[in-house]
Every structure is written in structure tokens, then in C-alpha cells.
Image: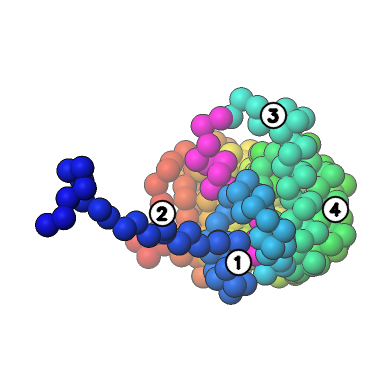
């Protein structure tokens, strides 16, 4: 064996390092579709122009969902600041623009009227709208969305306390496909008058009485799911009497309880 100064002579070959920026578009779409909007904004969009253009493609911007991030994030102290709301607004408006009218799902918190007015003008195909915990969202933007986005099927405006009873009414009158409604501190008359076609209704922490609940049950006969948790003015007798006429009801969450009440067990 040939030895050179006690060391074996080894021929080293340079390793080939792939150029990830040259992946074909099909691969890029497949990869980026697995990332959240937050992940796309802080990483691939900054790599090169091609990647940025793919991230802005309408195909990847039909859904704007920050709910998972809000639930998992432990940093909550700055969420109520104007600076944080401005960031949320900026991202939402960007996605609305990139979608080219194809944005169908919005799940967001801490946005303002600014971004929602922008959405109303550009996203007529919107079907799902969650604006939970948005103290700066008012009837102005929500009313415009209800008028310009009539395809909405699911609405969650829980804990957005600047919204009034008029907001519920305008959605009920203009969004005839509305099936799911989630709102705390709700006005029973607005539900029974304008939302008679809903199937899924969450009225947590409502102050309504047995009389108001009876009116909802009388007019919203297609209800399949009810959440009445945290509603102290409702009695069990009032609830049972109300739901007795709901032939399609499958599940109810009782007042003052976290337990589900299955109709077939009555």
C-alpha cells in the first residue's frame, strides 16, 4: 500500500449544491401551498423574485387564516395596540389584492375597518368571515361587506363589541346563503327576523331571556346546532320548550354548562 507521510491519498469530489431558486413552478406551488401566510411572508417571499411572484399568485391567496397563529402564540400583550392592528391590516389588504377577487376565507383578529373596507371592494366571492376580538371594526365596514359579498355562508363576530344590532340585520337581509352565525351578546329579534335560514347558531354569553329564545326557535326552524353557553337568563324549561319545535336540531350546548346536549337522548 502506498503511503504518503503516513496519510492515505484521497481524491475529493466537490459536492453538487442544488439551486433551489430554479425549481419548476409546479414544485413551488406544491411546497408553498403547505405553508401558512405568515410562513410565506417571512421566508420564501424574500428569497428571489420568482418565489415572490409565486407567493402572490391568486391560487395561494384564496384563504387568509390567522386563527391558528392567534391560538398558538403566547405573545398577547401587544395585540391591542394600533401598531399591531396596522400590521394585520397590511397583510390582509395584501392578500386581498393578490387574490384578484378570489379570496374566499378570512379568519382574523385585531383588524380594523381599513382592511375590511378594502376587502369589501375587492373580494365579492368571500364565503367565510371571522372577525373575532376586533374592537376597531364597526358597522361601516361590516355593512359594506354584507352588501358587496352576498356569498358569505359563515360569520363569526364574537367579541367585536363595536358592532351593533344593525350589523346582524344587514347580513341577514343580504347574505341569503348564511348558514353559520357566531355572536355573543346577540339581539334575539335580529336573529329571528333576518336570519331564519341559519343552521348553526352560537349565542354565547347572551343576555336573552326564555321569551327571546322562543322567538328564535319559532322563526329559525332549520337549526341543527345551538350553543347557549354562558347565558344566565335562560332556564332549562325555557330551553326545552323552545327546542321542542326544532325538528332538525341535532346538538345543543346548554346555558351555564360546557356539556353538549344530544337531542336523541331527550
Label 4, residues with CA under 10 Å away: few <14, some 14-19, many ≥20: some
Q: Nearer the viewer, residue 216 or 138?
A: 138
Quadrant assignment for the N terminus: bottom left
Q: Which residue is mark 4?
A: 118
Dividing the picture into quarters, in which one does residue 56 lie?
Answer: bottom right
Q: Nearer the viewer, residue 1 or 102?
A: 1
Q: Nearer the viewer, residue 37 or 159?
A: 37
Q: Which residue is mark 3?
A: 80
The reply to whether dot 3 and dot 2 touch (C-beta < 8 Å) is: no
Q: Which residue is mark 2?
A: 261
Give the spatial CA distance, label 3 vs label 2: 36 Å
- Identify the magenta region: 60-75
Q: Earlier in the sequence, mark 4 or mark 3?
A: 3
For the residue labelled by badge 3, is the local secondary structure a helix, a strand or a loop? loop
Residue 22's label in the rendered image is 1
The reply to whether dot 1 and dot 4 touch (C-beta < 8 Å) is: no
Residue 28 image offset from top left, x and y in percent: 58, 67
Q: Earlier in the sequence, mark 1 or mark 4?
A: 1
Give the spatial CA distance, label 1 vs label 2: 56 Å
Q: Is label 1 or label 2 in front?
A: 1
Q: Nearer the viewer, residue 239 or 68?
A: 68
Give the spatial CA distance, label 4 vs label 3: 21 Å
Give the spatial CA distance, label 4 vs label 2: 41 Å
Q: Is label 3 or label 2 in front?
A: 3
Residue 23 image offset from top left, x and y in percent: 57, 68
Q: Earlier in the sequence, mark 4 or mark 2?
A: 4
Label 3, residues with CA under 10 Å away: few <14, some 14-19, many ≥20: some
Residue 100 image offset from top left, x and y in percent: 80, 66
Amino acid at each position: 500500500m502506498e503511503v504518503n507521510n503516513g496519510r492515505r491519498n484521497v481524491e475529493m469530489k466537490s459536492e453538487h449544491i442544488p439551486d433551489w431558486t430554479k425549481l419548476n413552478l409546479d414544485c413551488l406551488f406544491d411546497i408553498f401551498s403547505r405553508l401558512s401566510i405568515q410562513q410565506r411572508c417571512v421566508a420564501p417571499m424574500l428569497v428571489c423574485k420568482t418565489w415572490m411572484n409565486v407567493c402572490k399568485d391568486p391560487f395561494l391567496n384564496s384563504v387568509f387564516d390567522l386563527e391558528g397563529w392567534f391560538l398558538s402564540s403566547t405573545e398577547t400583550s401587544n395585540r391591542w395596540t394600533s401598531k399591531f392592528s396596522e400590521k394585520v391590516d397590511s397583510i390582509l389588504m395584501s392578500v386581498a389584492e393578490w387574490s384578484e377577487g378570489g379570496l374566499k376565507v378570512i379568519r382574523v383578529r385585531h383588524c380594523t375597518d381599513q382592511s375590511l373596507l378594502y376587502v369589501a371592494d375587492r373580494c365579492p366571492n368571500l364565503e367565510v368571515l371571522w372577525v373575532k376580538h376586533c374592537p376597531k371594526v364597526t358597522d361601516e365596514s361590516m355593512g359594506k361587506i354584507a352588501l358587496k359579498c352576498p356569498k358569505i355562508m359563515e360569520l363569526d363576530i364574537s367579541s367585536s363589541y363595536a358592532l351593533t344590532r344593525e350589523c346582524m340585520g344587514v347580513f341577514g337581509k343580504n347574505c341569503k346563503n348564511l348558514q353559520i352565525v357566531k355572536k355573543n351578546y346577540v339581539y334575539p329579534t335580529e336573529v329571528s327576523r333576518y336570519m331564519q335560514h341559519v343552521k348553526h347558531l352560537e349565542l354565547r354569553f347572551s343576555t336573552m331571556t326564555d321569551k327571546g329564545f322562543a322567538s328564535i326557535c319559532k322563526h329559525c326552524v332549520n337549526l341543527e346546532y345551538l350553543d347557549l353557553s354562558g347565558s344566565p337568563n335562560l332556564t332549562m324549561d325555557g330551553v326545552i320548550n323552545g327546542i321542542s319545535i326544532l325538528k332538525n336540531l341535532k346538538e345543543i350546548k346548554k346555558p351555564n354548562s360546557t356539556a353538549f346536549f344530544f337531542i336523541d337522548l331527550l
